[in-house]
Image (cartoon, coloured by chain):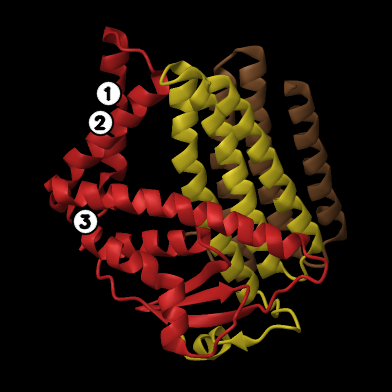
């Protein structure tokens, strides 16, 4: 199952790269994808069968739109902090608990935290995520974990768990 | 128009070079080199549009991957660990 | 219409690249520089790639530019995470104006892998 999903993903990337469809191209693509799958297929994510449900793709679309919006907001936030003459920053590293089970979901959550306003993920030990935050304005753990990861966590749980 | 954009991106690369020269620690220099790699990808895309040759975008793609591997190696070196962990 | 979008996206991308480079020069320590540089420069270059997509559609140029965007997101975020962790483990302390440091406590009781 895992190997088949990896093979199809490789084939899609091959056709996006070459962008033309004729016979030699298809044969070469199947050959290269097969060899790649033979060597690296075992490193692919577990539980691919979950992605046959169309419901997850709907949430993925919602997540993508929200992610792009947060990303643009993050850039204006950083631009404001950089261009302000007094540089209003209060950096620090805070601890946030994550509740997603799947490993791939955790990795995607850490990546999205890196691209959202003012935060960058430093380390993930077990279920604890250490986040460097450029503007620590509160000392209450519940409040800042809601601000840092709460926006994405519920959506990602619907996609990956 | 396209020339101005290219000159501006090269000027930003020079700003990164200032950070590489000044940077007090090794990590600062590695960050600046990583950022310079991403700027070079932007230059590749603009050059492909200007000259009309699509293989320059492939050059940019390979540049992303090589710069990523280099940065990861330097991060592991800073962490004082082997590459297979 | 698509030409207007093309020049608008290139202008936005170059503006964000400029902000990222100014942040790289102005901010005080490695972690803050990583914040400004990674976010702004990644989104700037993605804007430049998206401008090609806006002008040529899903033809030869557009497809390759579309492939660059996810590649850039994954590699730059993972590289930023690895560099932040590596420089912390290498002993580079936070800036003296920092407010909070939870990671120093965690590092002491982390199990040693051998």
Q: Are marks 2 and 3 on the same chain?
A: yes
Which chain is red in the picture? A
| Residue A44 in sight | no
Structural distance between the alpha carbons of marks 2 and 1: 5 Å
Q: Is residue C100 left or right of residue B82?
A: right
Report the mark closest to the observer, 2 or 3.
3
Q: Are marks 2 and 1 in contact (CB under 8 Å)?
A: yes
Question: Which of the chains bears the disc numbered 2?
Answer: A
Image height of B3 relative to A93, above or below: above
Please tell me which residue lies in front, C16 or A12.
C16
Instruction: Identify the mark at residue C64; answer none if there is no mark.
Output: none
* Quarter assignment of residue A39: top left
**Residue at 87% from the left image edge and 60% from the top image edge:** B22
Instruction: Identify the mark at residue A31; answer none if there is no mark.
Output: 1
**Residue at 72% from the left image edge and 51% from the top image edge:** C19
Please tell me which residue lies in front, C104 or C113.
C104
The residue indicated by pointer 2 is A34
Q: Quadrant of the C terminus of chain A?
A: bottom left
* Quarter assignment of residue C34: bottom right
Task: Name the tint of chain C in the rendering.
Answer: yellow
Q: Identify the mark nearer the N-term, 1 or 3.
A: 1
Task: Name the tint of chain B in the rendering.
Answer: brown
* Quarter assignment of residue C88: bottom right
Image height of C75 relative to B9, above or below: below
Q: Is residue C41 left or right of residue A82?
A: left
Measured from the top left, where is residue B11 in percent x and y?
Answer: 82, 39
Q: Around disc 1, counting alpha carbons within 10 Å, would you say few (fewer than 14), some (14 to 19), or many (20 or more)?
A: few
The residue indicated by pointer 3 is A46
SS type, badge 3: loop
SS type, badge 1: helix
**Residue at 60% from the left image edge and 67% from the top image edge:** C84
């Amino acid at each position: 199952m895992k190997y088949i999903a990896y093979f199809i993903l490789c084939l899609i990337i091959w056709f996006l790269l070459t962008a033309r469809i004729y016979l030699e191209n298809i044969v070469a693509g199947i050959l290269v994808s097969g060899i790649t799958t033979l060597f690296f297929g075992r490193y692919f994510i577990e539980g691919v069968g979950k992605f046959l449900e169309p419901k997850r793709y709907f949430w993925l679309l919602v997540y993508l739109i929200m992610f792009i919006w947060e990303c643009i907001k993050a850039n204006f936030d950083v631009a404001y902090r950089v261009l302000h003459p007094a540089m209003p920053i209060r950096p620090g590293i805070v601890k946030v608990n994550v509740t997603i089970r799947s490993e791939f979901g955790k990795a995607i959550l850490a990546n999205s935290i890196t691209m959202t306003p003012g935060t960058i993920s430093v380390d993930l030990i077990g279920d604890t995520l250490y986040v460097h935050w450029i503007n620590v304005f509160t000392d209450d753990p519940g409040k800042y974990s809601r601000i840092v990861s709460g926006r994405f966590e519920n959506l990602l749980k619907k996609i990956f768990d | 128009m396209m020339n101005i954009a290219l000159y501006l991106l090269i000027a930003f690369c020079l700003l990164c070079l200032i950070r590489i020269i000044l940077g007090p620690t090794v990590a600062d220099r590695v960050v600046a080199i990583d950022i310079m790699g991403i700027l070079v990808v932007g230059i590749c895309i603009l050059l492909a549009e200007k000259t009309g040759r699509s293989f320059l975008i492939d050059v940019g793609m390979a540049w992303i991957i090589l710069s990523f591997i280099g940065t990861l190696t330097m991060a592991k070196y800073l962490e004082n660990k082997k590459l297979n962990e | 219409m698509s030409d207007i979008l093309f020049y608008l996206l290139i202008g936005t991308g170059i503006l964000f690249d400029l902000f990222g480079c100014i942040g790289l020069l102005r901010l005080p320590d490695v972690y803050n520089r990583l914040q400004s540089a990674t976010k702004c420069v990644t989104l700037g270059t993605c804007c430049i790639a998206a401008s090609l997509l806006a002008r040529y559609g899903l033809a030869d140029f557009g497809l390759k530019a579309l492939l660059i965007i996810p590649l850039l997101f994954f590699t730059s975020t993972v590289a930023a995470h690895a560099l932040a962790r590596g420089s912390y483990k290498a002993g580079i302390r936070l800036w003296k104006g920092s407010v909070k440091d939870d990671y120093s406590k965690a590092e002491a009781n982390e199990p040693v892998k051998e």
